[in-house]
Image (cartoon, rainbow, N blue to C red):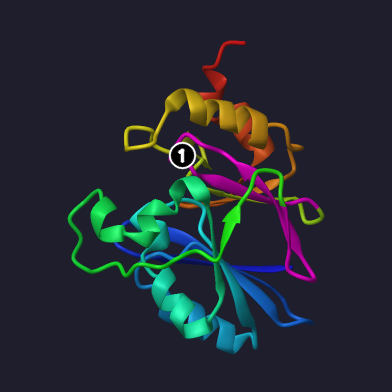
Amino acid sequence: MEIIPIEAGIVMTNGYLVFDRTSRTGIVIDTPDNSTRMYSDLARENNVDITAIILTHFHFDHTADAALLKKLTNADVYIHKDDEFAIIEPARHILFSLPFEILPVTPNKHLVHNELLDFGAFGFEVRHTPGHSEGSVCLVNHPEKVVFSGDTIFRLSIGRTDLPGGSYTKIMNSINESVLTLDDDYKIYSGHGGTTTVGFERKNNPFIARQTF
């Protein structure tokens, strides 16, 4: 399993092309604005067929190009059912005034907690992690010990909880139950900023350290 990160959009959002070079099967995790061309170029350079677009949550900076990339690749779009409303009718649920239009897209599949997604040469366990949004998810690949955390957890921080669907209590419960239950050497690829590990966050993340048990 190979991972190529991108950074795109007006708030510098991370997205990821994940693929197997032998089978040429690839998926995209999150689609920031202005990411379609980047993914298309990377797929062509690596001779990869993008078959799935997985959205970790509904916020525009992670979903803005989903419709465009789906049209280009005919890939299936995945999102948790609690967040699908905002990609089906994005104009009704934009939280900020944006200098571009987000096109609607209907998901092909819903992400379900503890579901195992199989893409042939690689796959993920879905972990529903509400708190940043109601339908936020993390994607865990156990053989490679990697976690795609969306905006649930970042290096030394967590996702904001002051937007609609956000909850500090829920996000901390999600982190405790779905992230900190992993071994320390799991690498975290988050929605913003650099990579980190579960062990580093367990020891150093101030939101985790301030918890009382």
Q: Quadrant of residue 163?
A: top left
Query: Which image quarter: residue 162?
Result: top left
- 112 relative to 133 in the view: left or right: right
Q: Which residues are magenta?
A: 116-142
Q: Please state the horizontal and vertical placement of residue 208, each as a whole percent of the image.
A: 55, 25
For this view, does 62 lie left or right of residue 4?
Answer: left
Amino acid type of disc 1? Answer: Glu
142 or 107, which is in the foreground?
107
Q: Quadrant of the N terminus?
A: bottom right
Q: Residues within 10 Å of mark 1 (few under 14, many from 20)?
A: many
| 134 relative to 204, above or below | below
Relative image position of residue 35 (x, y in whole percent): 41, 72
Q: Is residue 206 in view from this perspective?
A: no
The quadrant of the picture occupied by the C terminus is top right
Residue located at (73% from left, 68% from top): 119
Give yes or no for residue 135 being in the magenta stretch: yes
- Of 64 and 4, which appears nearest the observer? 64
Expressed as whole percent of the image width and height from the top left, the position of residue 170 reads 50, 27
Q: Quick one: SS at disc 1?
A: loop
Query: Of residues 10 and 90, which is closer to you in this image?
Result: 90
Residue that carries the numbered disc 1 in the rendered image: 134
Residue under the point 33% across and 37% down: 164
Task: Report how many numbered discs are placed on residues in the image.
Answer: 1
Vertical order, 106 against 201 (above or below): below
Judge whether residue 179 is colored magenta.
no
Q: Residue at x 75, y 43 (%)?
A: 185
In the foreground, 149 or 77: 77
Task: Decide: is 162 above or below 104.
Answer: above
Identify the residue at image location x=21%, y=51%: 96
